[in-house]
């Protein structure tokens, strides 16, 4: 390992917040030293609990997550929030203002907050999130909450790294929400109707129950439907109990082991792909690849033949 | 090419709708014959115009897209809508009801509608969408509208295949929408405030203008901000003119060429990765890969060392 990474790691292990932040930036962006850091920490991973929270925008998730983190602080010395903000692939620009206010209101020093924009992560957002979680895990975080806004494939991929996934909706989100719920519902282990004190909460809970009854459960776990009001904190204790009940079930049923094996498979396969492409490029040179791309763009060559040509070199 | 694919292709070229649908399913899911079909059609692609429409849920995009398709039918013999519905990676479940009602209200036989769920597309949703667009393009579609719901990285990747990207928002979507707009704004060529007859339309337009003024334009194109009411059709003609103005600019400035070269590069690189992994697996056997994955999951081995071991075989 390069010396800089080594001393950073030592400082981070002692709990130095700035060193932890720098370490996370390195692994998040896959900067030089990233692989060495992850190699060194890997044997110490797999201990932290990981809770995922997702749902459409406007659901009050940030407040809910802050409440959850505060509640888990009575059990764990160190809790972390990894907030993945939806953003463009070009500039990032995670909105932190809300979260800073939250920290002042609910959280203490035992809660580490990390905000990730969705830009430019080598190999995708889900893998970058997993790298961040692994580092926090190895550094002794007891529980990591991974929060994303949105219910697309990318967000689903991000929260799938969690042991337990909470889907947060709110009453009255309008038409399109039906389609969204139907999809993301399948990865949700715990369903939450937040802002449960606003009109339409009963309807929202009933809709969810109906959609659940239509689905074919992948396992024997039946996702409970909870009501919370993150603003005043009601329902948070029940939510913690539901998450813990799922975690207990997941551990005893083999579900947790299966999820973690799935994550390991994805990471190994992705790294394998990267390594193979790098080998090829260093063998045949990037100019040859660029030339093939140019001919594909002008329709002189189809992409399949282009690949055949490159591999036949 | 296998005989079945060949006869399917012949029927599709004659305009047989069921054959086209079957062809699209084959390329969408990368079924056997897919590569052959795309190879055969590739020289005839690159002619259709591609318009992307995206934005947060609840924006009335389906109606707007139907209106756009109807308007473009006065110019093009064949127009297609490829609607990418947000959905889980497990069961699909695209919601078609809305769209069928739309077809009855606005559209004629010259508009081909294809709905894609976001599940299980080998190599990701954006690539599957591009394969679909390529087939429609080669079969003589003059203009293809690619519609997605959502503003995450995946949706952005899907609409980036378009020559012109429209971002559709509506007044009063709440807090989180700020973060979303700031991100996706960068890939938008035309901005639309739909439901412009509802309260808050002025605020929404002003917010967009302000955010645009803060951004650093990647090119000299300044995205116009338009107001539409898809329900009664007002503003649609102006939207068509704005899209056409962008298309003309993109063609003359080299932007279009650059976007298409980018798409070609991504496809070639992705196919290259797939081919390399397949070669490796057939050489070392999938059992060896599974064994390495198992050891990574139990933390006996870190993923980087696992890849080193597999490649050193």
Image (tube, coloured by chain):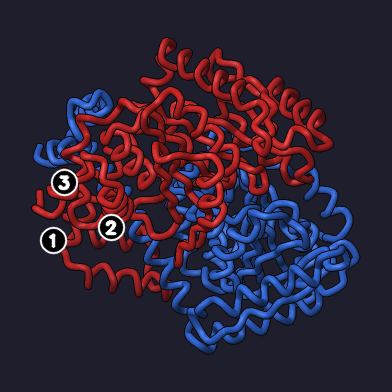
Chain colours: A blue, B red
State the separation of the CA atoms marked 3 and 1.
Answer: 25 Å
The residue lying toward the viewer, choosing from B104 and B212, is B104
Mark 3 vs mark 1: tell me if same chain: yes
Disc 3 + disc 1, Cβ < 8 Å: no
Quadrant position of residue A197: bottom right
Q: CA distance from mark 2 to mark 3?
A: 34 Å
Q: Nearer the viewer, mark 3 or mark 1?
A: 3
Q: Circle 1 is placed at which residue position? A: B283
In terms of sequence position, does the residue under pointer 3 or pointer 1 come before the other? Answer: 3
Q: Residue beneath label 3, please?
A: B36
Q: Position of residue B45 (x, y in %)?
A: 27, 31
The residue depicted at 29 percent of the width and 32 percent of the height is B140
**Residue B209 location, x and y as percent?**
73, 23
Residue hosting label 2: B308
Horizontal relation, residue B195 to residue A47: left or right: right
Residue B313 image-quadrant placement: bottom left
SS category of the residue bearing label 2? helix
- Disc 3 is placed on an element classified as helix
Q: Nearer the viewer, residue A220 or A159?
A: A220
Q: Residue at x 52, y 80 (%)?
A: A217
Q: Nearer the viewer, mark 2 or mark 3?
A: 3
Q: Can I make out residue A78 in this image?
A: yes
Earlier-in-chain disc, 2 versus 3: 3
**Chain of the residue under label 1:** B
Which is in the foreground here, disc 2 or disc 1? 1
């Amino acid at each position: 390992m390069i010396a800089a990474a080594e001393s950073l790691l030592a400082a981070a292990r002692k709990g130095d917040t700035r060193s932890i932040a720098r370490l996370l930036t390195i692994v998040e962006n896959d900067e030089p030293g990233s692989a060495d850091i992850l190699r060194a920490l890997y044997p110490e991973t797999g201990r932290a609990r990981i809770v995922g929270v997702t749902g459409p925008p406007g659901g009050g998730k940030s407040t809910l997550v802050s409440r959850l983190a505060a509640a888990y602080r009575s059990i764990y010395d160190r809790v972390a929030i990894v907030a993945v903000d939806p953003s463009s692939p070009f500039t990032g620009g995670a909105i932190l203002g809300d979260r800073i206010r939250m920290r002042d209101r609910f959280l203490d020093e035992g809660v580490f907050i990390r905000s990730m924009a969705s830009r430019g992560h080598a190999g995708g957002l889900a893998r970058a999130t997993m790298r961040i979680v692994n580092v926090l895990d190895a550094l002794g975080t007891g529980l990591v909450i991974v929060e994303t806004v949105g219910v697309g494939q990318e967000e689903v991929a991000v929260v799938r790294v969690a042991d337990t996934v909470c889907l947060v909706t709110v009453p009255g989100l309008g038409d399109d929400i039906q389609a969204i719920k139907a999809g993301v519902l399948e990865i949700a282990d715990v369903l939450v109707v937040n802002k449960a004190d606003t009109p339409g909460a009963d309807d929202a809970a009933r809709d969810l129950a109906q959609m659940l009854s239509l689905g074919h459960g992948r396992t024997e776990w039946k996702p409970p439907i909870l009501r919370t009001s993150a603003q005043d904190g009601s329902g948070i204790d029940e939510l913690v109990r539901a998450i813990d009940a799922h975690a207990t079930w997941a551990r005893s049923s083999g579900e947790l082991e299966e999820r973690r094996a799935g994550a390991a498979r994805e990471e190994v396969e992705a790294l394998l792909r990267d390594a193979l492409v790098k080998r090829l490029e260093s063998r045949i040179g990037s100019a040859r690849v660029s030339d093939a791309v140019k001919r594909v763009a002008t329709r002189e060559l189809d992409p399949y033949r282009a690949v055949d040509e490159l591999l036949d070199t």
